[in-house]
Image: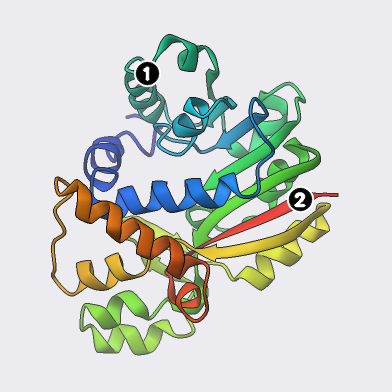
């Protein structure tokens, strides 16, 4: 039996979740937010739990040098398939590395990076401490640490929109749920994660939402067509603006926290 927990989910994650309008919004919004904080290319980036490279490959295309680290062989195979479709100069800027995020510093042989990304990973861990310590250790002095994870202050949004009222009532004080991929997940708060980063020498500088309205539409039964490129682009621009403003960012089911290593 395979030890790769993502082997059975790789197709669903890559071929369905990321090709949806919500997947496009996630990539676009995070990319714009990252560009506001990362040093200019060709700075070096480490994407911990980077999956098939949906977030880091566009950064490589923008001129960054990227190391994508992931424990799943199935996800790395997806990443390699996607990488082969990119221009040769972009391929040369990308390194794929199989390792656990909790062993990231050892896996990269002690290299430190100008930016360390970890998006959609913390929620699958019982405790974030060990992984967060590794992210901070891998960041160079003045480097950026970027974490996207579930928002514990918006746990009631999904069950309420799905009209699961008893679940919604119980979710106000919950920290765990079964996610949209059918996998148990855990949520954090901006305040607690900022304090955790501070303990490892990284000062939180900014936080954002990631998506909001696409959730409301999806869980209300509305399907957005990813083939309608013009509409998807308009949706993404609206979501980017909402991600920067209160109260909208507070209602996003995930948040994006960025800090700098002192």
Evaluate whether residue 251 shows in this view.
Answer: yes
Q: Is residue 81 above or below residue 124?
A: above
Near mark 2 (Cα within 10 A), the count class, few <14, some 14-19 or many ≥20, is: many
Q: Is residue 55 above or below residue 236?
A: above
Residue under numbered circle 1? 86
Residue 111: x and y in percent read 75, 25
> 144 or 137, which is in the foreground?
144
Residue 148: x and y in percent read 53, 55
Residue 122: x and y in percent read 54, 53
Residue at horizontal 75%, vertical 66%? Answer: 195
Residue under numbered circle 2? 260
> If you read the primary sequence from the N terminus, does the residue marked by circle 2 or circle 1 appear first?
1
Instruction: Give the structural element (helix, strand or loop) at label 1.
Output: loop
Q: Is residue 54 above or below residue 108?
A: below
Q: Is residue 116 above or below residue 196?
A: above
Residue at horizontal 38%, vertical 20%? Answer: 83
Colour approach in the figure = rainbow
- Check whether the beta carbons of the residues at disc 2 and disc 1 lie within 8 A of each other: no
Residue 192: x and y in percent read 68, 70
> 242 or 158, which is in the foreground?
242
Res 38 → quadrant: top right
Residue at horizontal 43%, vertical 31%? Answer: 72
Q: CA distance from mark 2 to mark 1?
A: 31 Å
Instruction: Give the structural element (helix, strand or loop) at label 2.
Output: strand
């Amino acid at each position: 039996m395979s030890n790769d927990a993502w082997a059975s989910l790789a197709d669903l994650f890559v071929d369905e979740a990321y090709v949806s309008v919500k997947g496009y919004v996630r990539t676009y919004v995070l990319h714009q937010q990252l560009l506001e904080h990362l040093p200019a290319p060709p700075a070096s980036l480490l994407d911990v739990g980077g999956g098939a490279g949906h977030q880091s490959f566009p950064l490589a295309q923008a001129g960054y040098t990227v190391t994508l680290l992931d424990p799943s062989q199935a996800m790395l195979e997806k990443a390699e398939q996607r990488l082969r479709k990119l221009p040769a100069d972009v391929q040369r800027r990308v390194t794929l590395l199989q390792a656990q995020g909790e062993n990231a510093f050892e896996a990269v042989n002690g290299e430190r990076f100008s930016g360390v990304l970890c998006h959609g990973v913390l929620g699958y861990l019982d405790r974030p401490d060990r992984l967060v310590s590794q992210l901070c250790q891998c960041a160079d002095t003045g480097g950026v640490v970027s974490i996207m994870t579930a928002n514990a202050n918006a746990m009631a949004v999904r069950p309420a929109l799905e009209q699961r009222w008893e679940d919604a009532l119980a979710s106000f004080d919950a920290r765990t749920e079964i996610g949209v991929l059918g996998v148990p997940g855990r949520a954090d708060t901006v305040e607690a994660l900022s304090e955790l980063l501070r303990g490892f020498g990284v000062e939180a500088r900014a936080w954002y939402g990631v998506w909001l309205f696409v959730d409301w539409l999806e869980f209300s039964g509305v399907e957005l067509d990813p083939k309608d490129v013009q509409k998807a682009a308009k949706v993404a621009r609206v979501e980017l603006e909402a991600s920067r403003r209160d109260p909208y960012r507070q209602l996003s089911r995930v948040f994006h926290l960025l800090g700098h290593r002192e």
